[in-house]
Image: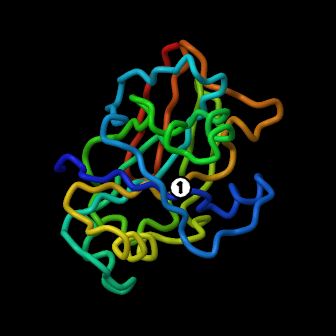
Amino acid sequence: MPAPEKVICVGLNYHDHALEQGGDLPEEPLLFGKFASALIGPGDAILLPPESSHVDAEAELVVVIGTEGRRVSEADALGLVAGYTVANDVTARDLQSKDGQWLRAKGFDTFCPLLPGVVPVSELGDGSGLRVVQRLNGDVLQDSSTSELIFGVPRLVAHTSNVFTLRPGDLILTGTPAGVGIHRKPPVALADGDVVEIEIEGIGTLRNPVRG
């Protein structure tokens, strides 16, 4: 796939994740971004920044844009989509809270592992009903389904196209389900030597080591 011009992310987009935080459901998709400098591939190390004391992994379905479009309707949105892949929206939780916005917390180098290759829309349709799992050192932290999405893929593509011209290679990370480390009791943070796996049904498994 072409190198992405934009890495667009969606926050608080799973019903179960919103529930575990005790927050209200958003009225429209909450958008933020990562830079391409955060992208790494399978097997590349997630580097823990010394500025943070709690870094989380987040399992995410990724929409890969295949056709340029601007202000498309939900009915036409899948026409812009080449297909789907898997990402890990790595997040420094303490910095996310401290800063009051998310750019630094989610923007460090290596904070967006991505599985190369795209499974086409012809195989996965609108991306609904896919099992999403995160394993940390073999233990399951997240185990949900894209059926829990608050805003599905057509809505996300249409909404983001109202803000940005979407171009081939652009990525939309659709949000993460319940089970992230910060909300576990006790909290679970990534540590040097860990291995994170993100698996999405019908697409594959993204595996990355963690280095301090």
Q: How is the protein colored in the picture?
A: rainbow
Q: Identity of the amino acid at label 1? A: Gly
Question: In this image, 61 relative to 57: left or right?
Answer: left
Question: Residue 125 appears at what percent x and percent y?
Answer: 36, 71
Residue on which disc 1 sits: 175
Question: Residue 11 appears at what percent x and percent y?
Answer: 56, 56
- Name which quarter of the figure residue 173 lies in: bottom left
- Name which quarter of the figure residue 83 lies in: bottom left
Image point 35% across, 23% down: which residue? 44
Mark 1 residue element: loop
Question: In this image, 207 relative to 192: left or right?
Answer: left
The 10 Å Cα crowd at callout 1, few under 14, some 14 to 19, many 20 or more, is: many
Number of dots carrying numbers? 1
Camera-side residue of 189 and 109: 109
Camera-side residue of 9 and 58: 9
Question: In this image, 122 relative to 68: left or right?
Answer: right
- Name which quarter of the figure residue 110 lies in: top left
Q: Is residue 153 above or below residue 74?
A: above
Question: Residue 177 appears at what percent x and percent y?
Answer: 62, 53
Image point 71% across, 28% down: which residue? 188
Question: Residue 192 appears at what percent x and percent y?
Answer: 56, 13
Image point 26% across, 69% down: which residue? 165
Residue lying farthest to the front in this orientation: 99
Q: Is residue 188 above or below residue 19?
A: above
Camera-side residue of 36 and 116: 36
Question: In this image, 190 relative to 104: left or right?
Answer: right
Image point 76% across, 59% down: which residue? 19
Q: Is residue 35 above or below residue 118?
A: above
